[in-house]
C-alpha cells in the first residue's frame, strides 16, 4: 500500500513519482506557503510537513480519494495504517498533527466546510 517512509530527495534516494499523482496536492503547496509566510516556518519544518502530508496523500490515493476530501474515517484508517507500519507513537502523533493543521487550513481558507 503506502511505504513507511517516503523517499527523501538529496539523500541518495529518488523522489517517489506517485507523489505527483496525489489529487488535490496543490492545496498542500498553498498550505506550505502559508506556514512559511505567516508563521515563519523554517525550511526543515516545511520539508517535514511536506513529507507527512505526502504520506497521507499517498494513503488517500490508494483509497481513491483526493487529499482535500478526506473524511474522519480516512484519518482513523490512516492512524491504524501507521500503527500497522510499526511507527513510534511520536512519529504517528507528528503525522497526525500535520494532517490536522492541513485540514484546519483548508477550512479556514474556505476550501472545506468541515475539519475531519
Image (spheres, rainbow, N blue to C red):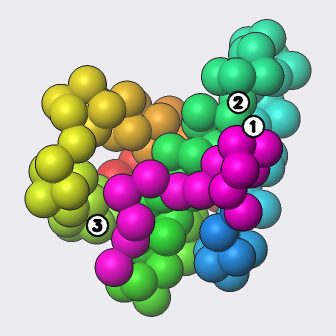
Q: Residue at x 69, y 35 (%)?
A: 47
Q: Secondary structure at mark 3?
A: helix
Q: Does the magenta stretch mainly form a helix, a strand or a loop? A: loop
Find residue 88 and report its image quarter: top left
- Classify mark 2: residues with Cα within 10 Å, few (<14), some (14-19) or many (20+): some
- Give the percent coordinates (x, y) of residue 37: 86, 20
User: Among all residues in the image, which is located at the extreme front?
Assistant: 12
Is any part of residue 112 visible from this angle?
no
Q: Secondary structure at mark 1?
A: helix
* Mark nearer the N terminus (1 vs 2): 1
In the rendered image, the quadrant that contains the N terminus is bottom left
- Give the percent coordinates (x, y) of residue 87: 22, 42
Find residue 78 and report its image quarter: bottom left
- Give the percent coordinates (x, y) of residue 115: 40, 48
Task: Kindly report the distance in space between the C-alpha atoms of the residues bearing marks 3 and 1.
Answer: 22 Å
Residue placed under numbered mark 1 in the picture: 32
User: Among all residues in the image, which is located at the extreme bottom?
Assistant: 64
Residue placed under numbered mark 2 in the picture: 46
Q: Nearer the viewer, mark 3 or mark 2?
A: 2
Do tag 1 and tag 2 residues touch (Cβ < 8 Å)?
Answer: yes
Viewer-proximal residue among 4 and 50: 4
* Mark nearer the N terminus (3 vs 2): 2
Viewer-proximal residue among 50 and 109: 50
15 is within the stretch colored magenta = no
- Range shown magenta: 1-14
* Mark nearer the N terminus (3 vs 1): 1
Residue placed under numbered mark 3 in the picture: 74
Task: Kindly report the distance in space between the C-alpha atoms of the residues bearing marks 3 and 2.
Answer: 23 Å
Viewer-proximal residue among 24 and 48: 48
- Give the percent coordinates (x, y) of residue 95: 39, 39
Q: Secondary structure at mark 2?
A: helix
Instruction: Name above or below for residue 21 compared with residue 51.
Output: below
Amino acid at each position: 500500500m503506502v511505504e513507511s517512509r517516503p523517499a527523501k530527495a538529496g539523500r541518495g534516494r529518488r523522489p517517489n513519482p506517485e507523489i505527483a499523482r496525489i489529487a488535490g496536492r496543490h492545496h498542500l503547496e498553498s498550505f506550505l506557503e502559508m506556514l512559511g509566510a505567516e508563521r515563519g516556518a523554517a525550511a526543515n519544518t516545511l520539508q517535514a510537513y511536506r513529507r507527512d502530508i505526502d504520506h497521507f496523500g499517498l494513503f488517500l490515493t490508494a483509497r481513491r480519494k483526493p487529499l482535500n476530501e478526506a473524511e474522519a474515517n480516512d484519518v482513523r484508517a490512516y492512524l491504524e495504517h501507521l500503527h500497522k507500519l510499526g511507527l513510534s507513537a511520536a512519529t504517528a502523533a507528528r503525522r497526525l498533527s500535520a494532517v490536522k493543521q492541513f485540514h484546519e487550513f483548508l477550512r479556514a481558507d474556505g476550501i472545506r466546510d468541515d475539519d475531519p
